[in-house]
Amino acid sequence: MAALRVPSPSKSSSFWSSSSSSFFSRCSLGHKTLAFNESRFRICASNSFKCDLPRSVNYGNGKPTIPILNERTLPKFLESARMETTVNRNGAKLKLFSGTANPALSQESVRGCDVYLIQPTCPPANENLMELLIMVDACRRASAKNITAVIPYFGYARADRKTQGRESIAAKLVANLITEAGANRVLACDLHSGQSMGYFDIPVDHVYCQPVILDYLASKTICSDDLVVVSPDVGGVARARAFAKKLSDAPLAIVDKRRHGHNVAEVMNLIGDVKGKVAVVVDDMIDTAGTIAKGAALLHQEGAREVYACCTHAVFSPPAIERLSGGLFQEVIITNTLPLAEKNYFPQLTVLSVANLLGETIWRVHDDCSVSSIFQ
């Protein structure tokens, strides 16, 4: 089985800093299929997402190499056990950049290349968004063939509709900005609502990070008969149902909540049976953790044996850490689509890497292969 390998950064480097943006571009790569090995990677312990393609490739010694023209540090987001230091620098096919927006394009040509800009619009959201737009514009003016904006966390996704008068639909505005800047495609992870894809007038590849969490849960010694998947609100029922179906077709429970103000939630009752069960609460993001913490308290009141919290985007606005580390959860499982400050780590937290999942998606997009088949 062939392995994709790229150099890992030093431990002191920081990919997710607001002043850094990274992209890699690839011109006339001949690899039509690529498969990763099955080693495990985890930030807190071991996890994995198995990124397998239908068939493997063999080039030379069986390990396709990636020519790199730039010695700058590879972003931490792309670190994994599969991405090690097997590099051929004699070619000009793949370029890695890391640094501020304009200098990143000052030394290397991207003319005729397919460029992938990796930038989450996490806080400071406005700075990161502006940096992404500048990079897209710079690539367009440098005659890049195709520009794909890879946005692990779309920070404005919750502003997808008007909830009151004189309110902006910021998700649509940001989509227009990215499109007008010159992006040809967007690749985003776990959008807050599916209709956000319709705000873009360009193709959008929606990457679901559920397989990463499911693979980790499958590695735990939890009896499938004891599992129950819980949606923290009515709006997340479809997400929780899809998660439960893939998790041994577990039963579903729903927490009914009434929100009385912005970022303030009040749990009212529970739909479903959780007595003596291991409850897995699934959501796309955790912000202040008010909803999920009150839901966990209700689950314990209803007799749940253990409560796990799973989400893709760990926004963790205060006082989220206090609520999550207060003993309500056996484990809080998140992914690294957002930077996580060292002060926000707590004993129950597990961080899973989506590097392989996102890397697999990028290769498939470039090679015109199916992306949806990854999640089937």
Image (cartoon, rainbow, N blue to C red):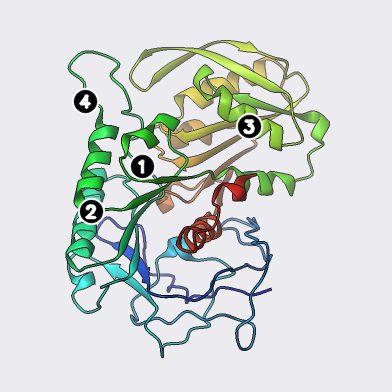
Residue depicted at x 63% and y 57%: 45
CA neighbours of label 1 inside 10 A, class few (<14), some (14 to 19), many (20+):
many
Tag 1: amino acid: Phe
| Mark 1, secondary structure of its residue | loop
Tag 3: amino acid: Ala
| Mark 2, secondary structure of its residue | loop
Mark carried by residue 104 = none
CA neighbours of label 2 inside 10 A, class few (<14), some (14 to 19), many (20+):
many
Q: Is residue 175 left or right of residue 154?
A: left
Tag 2: amino acid: Gly
Q: Quadrant of residue 80?
A: bottom right
Where does label 2 land, which residue? 182
Where does label 4 land, which residue? 168
| Mark 4, secondary structure of its residue | loop
- Whichever of labels 4 and 3 marks the residue nearer the N terminus, that label is 4
**Where does the C terminus fall, quadrant-wise?**
top right
- Whichever of labels 1 and 4 marks the residue nearer the N terminus, that label is 1
Real-space CA distance between mark 3 and mark 1, rounded to the nearest whole angstrom? 22 Å
In this view, the residue in front, 231 or 292, is 231
Where does label 1 land, which residue? 154
Residue depicted at x 80% and y 35%: 224
Q: Is residue 353 above or below residue 229?
A: below
The label nearer to you, 2 versus 1, is 2
Tag 4: amino acid: Ser
- Whichever of labels 2 and 1 marks the residue nearer the N terminus, that label is 1
